[in-house]
């Protein structure tokens, strides 16, 4: 189920303009899944800077997401980490220095 409370919390923390907040508010569950897949498909077993990943996904995202701010993508990275779908090295609050990657298939690295 789509987490409207989580979305509201993400919106409240964004310093972006009204247009960006409205664009995020229009997102549906299938949009969240698609954005999560965009993030996951940009990762592999190598550590990547989380800020570069979110910026890259923002730039490469389909046109229907052009008004979605980078802060939303960053919130999805946090959600993927909290769901143990990606591995994190560093503090997700500091995307410049945080690194992320897909978990190893065997659970060992």
Image: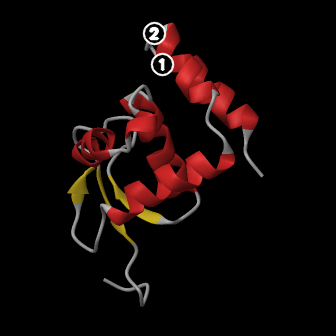
Q: How many marks?
A: 2
Which residue sits at x=58%, y=18%?
A: 22
- Residue 30 position in % (x across, y down): 63, 51
| Image location (x, y in percent) of residue 51 | 26, 41
The C terminus sits in image quarter: bottom left
Q: Residue at x 48, y 50 (%)?
A: 35
Q: Quadrant of residue 11?
A: top right
In front of the other: 15 or 89:
15
Residue found at the very far front of the displayed protein: 63
The colour mode here is secondary structure
Q: Which residue is mark 1?
A: 20
Report helix, strand or loop for mark 1. helix
**Foreground of the two, 90 or 32:** 32
What is the spatial separation of the Cα atoms under label 1 and label 2, in whole angstroms?
A: 5 Å
Residue 23: percent from the left, percent from the top? Answer: 54, 24
At 67% from the left and 48% from the top, the residue drawn is: 29
Residue where numbered disc 2 is placed: 17
**Can you tell which quarter of the image residue 102 is in?**
bottom left
Mark 1, other Cα within 10 Å: few <14 / some 14–19 / many ≥20:
some
- Which residue is rendered at x = 42% and y = 25% of the image? 67
Question: Is 107 above or below relative to 71?
Answer: below
Q: Is residue 26 above or below residue 57?
A: above
Q: Tell me the number on the disc at residue 86.
A: none
The reply to whether residue 13 is in sight is no
x, y percent for residue 37: 46, 60
Whether label 1 touches label 2, CB < 8 Å: yes
Position of residue 56 in the picture relative to residue 16 (left or right):
left
Asked where in the image residue 56 lies, by quadrant, the reply is: top left
Q: Viewed as shown, does residue 53 lie left or right of 88? A: left
Q: Is residue 67 above or below residue 104?
A: above
């Amino acid at each position: 189920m789509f987490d409207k409370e989580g979305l509201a919390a993400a919106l409240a923390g964004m310093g972006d303009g009204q247009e960006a907040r409205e664009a995020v508010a229009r997102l549906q569950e299938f949009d969240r899944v698609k954005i999560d897949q965009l993030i996951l498909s940009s990762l592999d077993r190598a550590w990547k800077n989380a800020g570069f990943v979110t910026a890259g996904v923002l730039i490469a995202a389909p046109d229907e997401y052009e008004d979605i701010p980078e802060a939303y993508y960053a919130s999805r990275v946090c959600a993927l980490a909290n769901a143990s779908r990606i591995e994190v090295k560093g503090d997700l609050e500091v995307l410049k220095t945080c690194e992320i990657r897909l978990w190893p298939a065997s659970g060992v690295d």
